[in-house]
Every structure is written in C-alpha cells, then in structure tokens.
Image: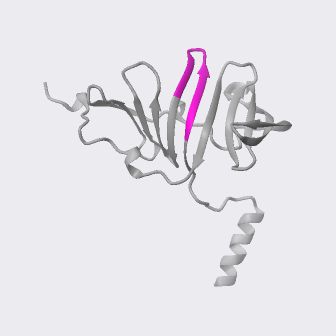
Amino acid sequence: MKRLTAMTLAMSLYAGLSVPSEALEFTADRITRTDRGLHHARIFYRDEMWRLEHNGNGPVSITIVRQDRDQVWHLMPSTRHFKVVSFHHDYALHLTTGLENEKSREAIGTQQLDGHPTTLYEVTVSLPGGQIETYYQWIATDIQFTLKLAKKNGDWMVEYRHVKLGPIADSFFQLVPTTSNPSEEKS
C-alpha cells in the first residue's frame, strides 16, 4: 500500500499536478493605480480571505473579503455598520506567479524592488473574445511573490510593499460584534 501511495505521488508530480502546500499568509502595503487614481491600503491575507484597511477618504474604511463564504463585508466603523455584497471576480487579487489565460512569458530583466531581488517578465494573456493584453510582472526571487503587476499600456498597476510572510490571526477576517447590518435592522 505504501508503495502504491508513493507511486501515485510520483506520477502526480511527473504529470505536473500540484500537491497542496502550506497556505500563503502575509501582510503588506498595497498600492493600486487605475483611471480613478492612486489608492493605498494595508492588506492582511490568508488563502480565500483578505482584509483591506483603506487609507483614503470615504465611508468604507475596511473591506473584508471572504471568498470561502462568497461574501464581501464593507465596514464603516464611524457608524458601526457594515454592508454585505456577493463576491465577484473584480475583488480577486493577482498573487500567483502565473496569470490566468497566460499565452507567453518572457524574462526581460532583473531589478531590486522594495529591497527584494526580482525578475521582470513581459506576460501576454488572452481575454474573452480573442483579445490579447500584455502585462509587466515583477516576481521577488527570494520569497517567490508577485511584488508588482502592471498593464504594459500603463492603464493599471498593483504593487505590494513591506511584505511580511507569516501567520495572520483569525480576528482580522471576522466582524466586530458591535457592528450591525442596516438592512437587517427593523424600522
């Protein structure tokens, strides 16, 4: 039986199938640039759940994404309320070293980014409808983490700074008992 299990594992690795590894957990400063401007947030991440503490003006100061529950909670601590919305792919983070629908990848250089040695790649992906889009991706070679991803045309960019790998407490992904959902309150 042990020999069969070892043989199955070896065949899985040979076939290119992944064997589950330790979950990714980290904290970082996240900078996003879009046509709507520059946005800064502190991120606390654990597989299938993350918390963004926004550093900007607006009613929402914390967003907790629970992909495992198919929910997103927008917290408004000043009013002690939160809003629940369904998870949508727009909330997804781009953390893997391989991009979805990747067609080609070419290493085009090396660079230091936030104190980490990185390899810079030009990555081409196919979009629905047959469109092609090109990105630049900086992968830290010391921690195997995508520190920066940007569209080649400059329309969009996300960057992670001050990345610290390590366990994150469950409390970062829970609602505070003193918050309430206004849609559940009685008139």
Residue 162 visible to an observer of this rendering: yes
Taking the spot 70% from the left edge, 49% from the top edge, the residue there is 144
Q: Which of 97 and 15 is in front in this view?
A: 97
Q: Which of 35 and 110 is in front in this view?
A: 110
Residue 100 visible to an observer of this rendering: no
In the figure, residue 35 lies in which quadrant?
top right
Which of the image's four quarters has the C terminus? top left
Magenta span has 32? yes
Q: Which of 183 and 45 is in front in this view?
A: 45
Which of the image's four quarters has the N terminus? bottom right
Quick check: 56 above or below 93?
above
**What residue occupies the far left of the structure in this picture?**
187
Q: Residue 98 vs residue 58: left or right?
A: right
In the figure, residue 137 lies in which quadrant?
top right
Taking the spot 54% from the left edge, 23% from the top edge, the residue there is 39
Position of residue 176 measured from the top left corner of the image (x, y, whole percent): 29, 41
Magenta span has 142? no
Position of residue 5 measured from the top left corner of the image (x, y, whole percent): 66, 77
Quick check: 9 above or below 20?
below
Question: Colour scheme of this structure image?
Answer: one colour
Count of residue discs: 0
Taking the spot 53% from the left edge, 30% from the top edge, the residue there is 90
Instruction: Identify the main secondary structure in magenta.
Output: strand
Which residues fall within the magenta stretch? Answer: 28-40
**What residue occupies the far front of the structure in this picture?**
115
Position of residue 20 measured from the top left corner of the image (x, y, whole percent): 61, 61
Quick check: 129 above or below 6?
above
In the figure, residue 71 lies in which quadrant?
top left
Q: Residue 89 vs residue 59: left or right?
A: right
Taking the spot 67% from the left edge, 59% from the top edge, the residue there is 18
Position of residue 149 measured from the top left corner of the image (x, y, whole percent): 69, 32
